[in-house]
Amino acid sequence: MEIVIVLLILISLGITIGIIIAIVFGSKSSKTKSQHTSSISSYSNSRDIFERKPKWKIFEDITKLHLKDIAKKNNYVFIDGGLFKHDNDKLTEIDSILITTKAIYIVEIKRYNGSLVGSYNERNVSLIDWSKNLEVINPFFQNDKHIWHFKKIIKRKTSIYSLIILLNLESIEMQGLPENPFVVASIDNVDKELKNFESHLTDDSNLKEERLGKIIEMINIARTNDPMDKARFQQIISKNDEKANLPIF
């Protein structure tokens, strides 16, 4: 009888211990699985956001970060781009603006890789990369238009140049002359090309601190976030793109 009682007690203890072990390990497994699922979900969300961003926009954002670093290192002024409005209804979209003691640079960023062939004064040019030959928007022509608008915005006589930044520039085979002097560079040699260009310039008195503040103020006044302006500008861009039927980089 005593042996039976002892056996029953041992069996009861064994069952109890088994239940406790099952609860503990089951809880850990559930927690680990939950964490793993959460990690996958987080990664998936960030990946989806990245994949939804066009390649040209990723390149533009990277280039702007690079320009900010150059500005910080050289004590320049970097102004992020956007939509600008002047004379009541004139609109222009500028990628970014870089200001040194010698000049203001209106920046146009294009994710172009290869050689540009055509005319400075035509809206479209050929982008040649190995066997590929694509018709694309002419960044020189486009930025000349931006500079025309910018001069109307600041209403100041100062040195304004075009800064074209491409993904990788092989060569330029362009005819004619652009409206504005320019600096053209690949993303990895912007600082070098800019310094080389500026070595031929002298300081602009209109860009001294006391006068520069007024120019920056005029730029900020012209910036517009009005949904109606954005919609109207997008409509203009869409019509131009449809007419040209050009690829987007």
Image (cartoon, rainbow, N blue to C red):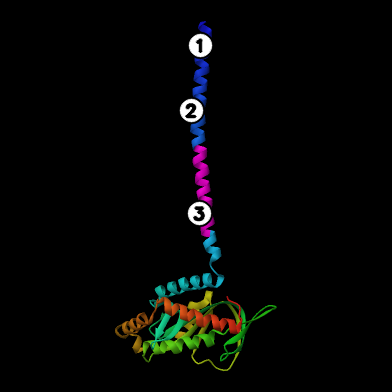
Q: Is residue 242 magenta?
A: no
SS of the residue at dot 3?
Answer: helix
Residue lying at the far bottom in this picture: please name it: 176
Q: Is residue 3 above or below residue 75?
A: above
Amino acid type shown at disc 3: Ser
Q: Which mark is residue 42?
A: 3
Q: In front here: 91 or 123?
A: 91
Q: Residues within 10 Å of mark 1 (few under 14, many from 20)?
A: few
Our reading of the magenta stretch's main secondary structure is helix
Quarter of the view holding residue 148: bottom left
Q: Residue 201, can we see it? A: no
Residue under pointer 2: 20
Q: Are marks 3 and 1 in contact (CB under 8 Å)?
A: no
Q: Are marks 3 and 2 in contact (CB under 8 Å)?
A: no
In the shown orientation, is residue 115 left or right of residue 148?
Answer: right
SS of the residue at dot 1?
Answer: helix
Residue depicted at x 49% and y 15%: 9
Amino acid type shown at disc 2: Ile
Report how far apart the C-alphas of labels 1 and 2 lie in the structure: 21 Å
Amino acid type shown at disc 1: Val
Q: Is residue 180 above or below residue 25?
A: below
Report how far apart the C-alphas of labels 3 and 2 lie in the structure: 33 Å
Q: Earlier in the sequence, mark 3 or mark 2?
A: 2
Residue 13, horizontal then vertical, whole percent: 49, 19
Residue under pointer 1: 6
Report how far apart the C-alphas of labels 3 and 1 lie in the structure: 54 Å
Quarter of the view holding residue 166: bottom right
